[in-house]
């Protein structure tokens, strides 16, 4: 297949619609292939027939976590991917049931987390592994955080990245973020369209947050990127998973 043909397919498959959500890895670099085996590309089939994308991450062989605002008519998860156009050892699994957080607020985006139960179990291997979740919030901001995803890499682009990208972010102490139970970062590096639902991975390689939204400060300055706190949702996460498995 010619290079031009491959590029045409990538553009057709990965085109994004306009979104207000956060979702591009800007100011980052390409991730080492398969160094983030928990990463999930979420294919979303919308009610209007269009296909959109979000990020996500693997919790266990049955469940993926993403953002609640990544709702859709139906879903398919892509596991084990680095270059999204490659079919080599990639697992594509449909979603049996979606569980948005029961207190998700679609206006403020508080509790912007969602669990997806897979129709068949993920097959763990070197390229597909779950990520552990952060424990209880002790009030201290985690350090050395990393974002990864296939979202846009340029503000003027309408296409997702064909390869997994990543960047480091530093969390900020922000009063509004604290009140609404978000972790936040600010600056020229961060997420945008296509990366929503991906994990904020910090100390000890654990998932501390879920990529949610970006807001522009009233006082001006660069956008503030918000991540739903996983420690605040631990009880809901584990009870939801437990109840879903009991019903099997």
Image (cartoon, helix red, strand yellow):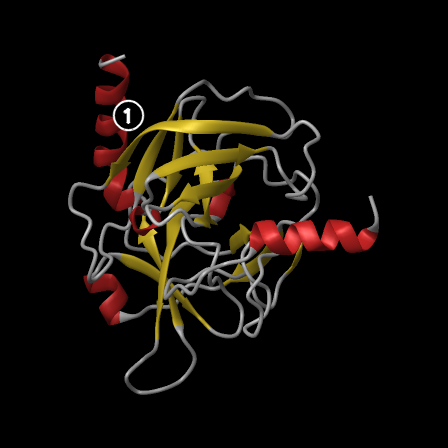
On the image, the x and y values in percent for residue 53 come to 47, 49
Residue at position x 29%, y 41% from top? 136
Q: Quadrant of the N terminus?
A: top right
Q: Is residue 201 left or right of residue 225?
A: right
Q: Out of 72 and 37, give the one closest to the viewer.
A: 72
On the image, the x and y values in percent for residue 91 come to 57, 27
Q: Quadrant of the C terminus?
A: top left
Is residue 50 in view? Answer: yes
Q: Quadrant of residue 242?
A: top left
Q: Residue furthest right?
A: 2
- Disc 1 crowd rating (10 Å Cα; few below 14, some 14-19, many 20+) is some
Q: Out of 158 and 26, give the one closest to the viewer.
A: 158
Q: Is residue 210 left or right of residue 14?
A: left
The residue that disc 1 covers is 241
Q: Out of 241 and 50, give the one closest to the viewer.
A: 50
Q: Is residue 22 above or below residue 39?
A: below
Q: Is residue 33 left or right of residue 141?
A: right
Q: Is residue 133 above or below residue 170?
A: above
On the image, the x and y values in percent for residue 240 come to 23, 28
Residue at position x 24%, y 70% from top? 175
Count the numbered circles shown. Answer: 1
Residue at position x 42%, y 65% from top? 18
Q: Is residue 231 left or right of residue 207?
A: left
Residue at position x 24%, y 62% from top? 178
Is residue 162 in view? Answer: no
On the image, the x and y values in percent for residue 233 come to 25, 41
Q: Out of 5 and 85, give the one closest to the viewer.
A: 5
Q: Secondary structure at mark 1?
A: helix
């Amino acid at each position: 297949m010619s290079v031009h043909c491959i590029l045409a397919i990538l553009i057709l498959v990965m085109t994004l619609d306009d979104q207000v959500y956060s979702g591009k890895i800007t100011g980052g670099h390409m991730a080492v292939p398969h160094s983030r085996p928990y990463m999930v590309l979420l294919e979303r089939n919308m009610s209007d027939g269009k296909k959109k994308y979000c990020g996500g991450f693997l919790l266990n062989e049955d469940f993926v976590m993403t953002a609640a605002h990544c709702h859709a008519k139906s879903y398919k998860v892509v596991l084990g991917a680095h270059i999204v156009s490659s079919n080599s050892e990639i697992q594509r699994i449909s979603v049996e049931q979606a569980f948005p957080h029961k207190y998700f607020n679609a206006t403020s985006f508080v509790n912007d987390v969602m669990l997806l139960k897979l129709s068949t179990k993920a097959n763990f291997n070197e390229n597909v592994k779950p990520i552990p979740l952060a424990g209880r919030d002790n009030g201290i901001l985690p350090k050395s955080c990393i974002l990864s995803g296939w979202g846009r890499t340029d503000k003027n682009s309408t296409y997702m990245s064909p390869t997994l990208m990543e960047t480091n972010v530093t969390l900020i102490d922000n009063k509004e973020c604290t009140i609404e139970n978000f972790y936040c970062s600010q600056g020229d590096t961060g997420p945008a369209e296509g990366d929503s639902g991906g994990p904020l991975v910090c100390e000890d390689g654990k998932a501390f947050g879920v990529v949610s939204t970006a807001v522009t400060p009233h006082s001006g300055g660069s956008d503030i990127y918000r991540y739903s706190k996983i420690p605040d949702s631990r009880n809901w996460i584990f009870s939801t998973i437990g109840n879903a498995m009991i019903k099997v």
